[in-house]
Amino acid sequence: MNTETELLKSPSELSLTKVIPLSKSPTLRNNFMVIDGDMKANIRFGLLLEIMDTLAADTARMYVHQFYEDAVVVTAAIDNVVMRNAADIHKDLFFESRLNYVGKTSMEVGIRIEQQNPTIHIATCYFTLVARRGPIDNRVSVELEPLEYKGETEKRRYKKAVERKENYFKERNMDNEMPSKDEYEHLREMHHAQESPEFNGVLASNLVMESWERMFPAYKNPNHTIFGGYLARRSYELSAMCAELIATKRPVIAAVNRMNFINPVRIGDKLLFKSHIVYTNSAFICVETVINRIGRHEKKISNLSDSCLFTFLNVDDDMQPHDVEKIYPTTYFEDEKYLQAQRSLTSIMPAIKNGILNKDIAD
């Protein structure tokens, strides 16, 4: 442990930067492209999630290791990412991280992505991390020292972090609420429509993709478990392919809701990534991905994550939105997921309007 005079305890001291020099490296550009072509938003968003996760962990580790040199830092959640502008594959990507908030056992690291000439805000993402100690099979969370919020900017970011945490619990409670009268009537009409002999709508049960993967040593982090960023990237990539099942043009990421990671993933585990389209509206496609795991010496599947909800926008090469077909849930489970996604999209729509989405089409 450092002496008290050496401690870094304000957010301004706990910040890191990273640059991906896309403008200077054809090899990097090739690695980050979605397709081999010159078009807007032609960048692998999943790779950005992976980079941000590593940067967030490094930032949190700077703080934690001042008090617990043997502690490991793990990603617990990724919160509300809204795409502000489409990234240009020919320009460098600038990442800046900062420790915004430290609670009793958890921390929030905010990361902003920009491109320059002129300066363009691509996205901001918030990571919740926890510090743990002990044997790899029995690690426990440790209590953290509070940060010192000195300037007005640091206090404002602290307040926003607390609000995000409170909003998350409100949304969790909202997910468990019974349907309102209007929601019930909407679901009833969709189920009634399916009883018609002329019905030819798109069923949610047919819009599913899944993929199994084994976790190899090459994927491990300094904690000797699997990077949360790797899991986020794989979840996103399968979700994007699933969105293509109904997209008439190409699905571009508009927002990511909170992703929670419940259990660590160890080397040799088998993971099942399962994506399904749960809601569509206008040009929006909401895809939920759930991760399950089977340990090396286990037969039973256990949950690894809560649902990861991705909101895509169906756009053409000029980023103009195009409506997709309405989907119809057929089971109680699909009804529940439909309503959760509908409520979630409604709650983040103000942010999306100010983001990559043309404001006019959200009205």
Image (spheres, rainbow, N blue to C red):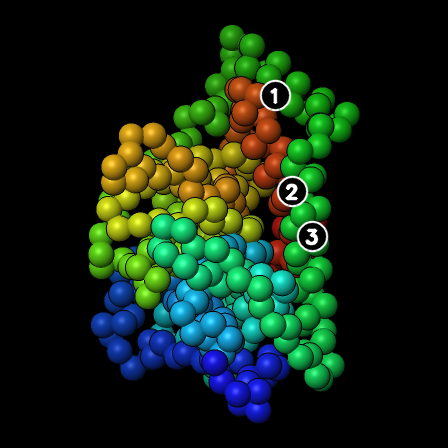
Answer with left or right where residue 277 lies relative to residue 39: right
Badge 1 element: helix
User: For residue 39, which quarter of the picture?
Assistant: bottom left
Residue under the image location 61 percent in, 36 percent down? 340
Name the residue that disc number 1 marks: 190
Q: Nearer the viewer, residue 111 or 11?
A: 11
Q: Residues within 10 Å of mark 2 (few under 14, many from 20)?
A: few
Answer with left or right where residue 343 lies relative to residue 228: right
> Disc 3 and disc 1: Cα gap in Å?
30 Å
* Residue at the far bottom in the pictured view: 5
Q: Tell me which amino acid carries mark 1.
A: Met
Name the residue that disc number 2 marks: 172
> Disc 1 and disc 2: Cα gap in Å?
25 Å
Name the residue that disc number 3 marks: 167
Give above or below for 36 relative to 327: below
Q: Residues within 10 Å of mark 3 (few under 14, many from 20)?
A: few
Q: Earlier in the sequence, mark 1 or mark 2?
A: 2
Can residue 145 be seen? yes
Answer with left or right where residue 229 lies relative to residue 9: left
Q: Tell me which amino acid carries mark 2.
A: Arg
Answer with left or right where residue 130 lies relative to residue 11: left
Residue 37: give x, y in percent of width and height: 30, 62
Residue 193: give x, y in percent of width and height: 59, 16
Q: Earlier in the sequence, mark 3 or mark 1?
A: 3
Q: Are marks 3 and 1 in contact (CB under 8 Å)?
A: no
Q: Tell me which amino acid carries mark 3.
A: Asn
Q: Nearer the viewer, residue 266 or 91?
A: 266
> Disc 2 and disc 3: Cα gap in Å?
9 Å
Residue under the image location 62 percent in, 69 percent down? 101
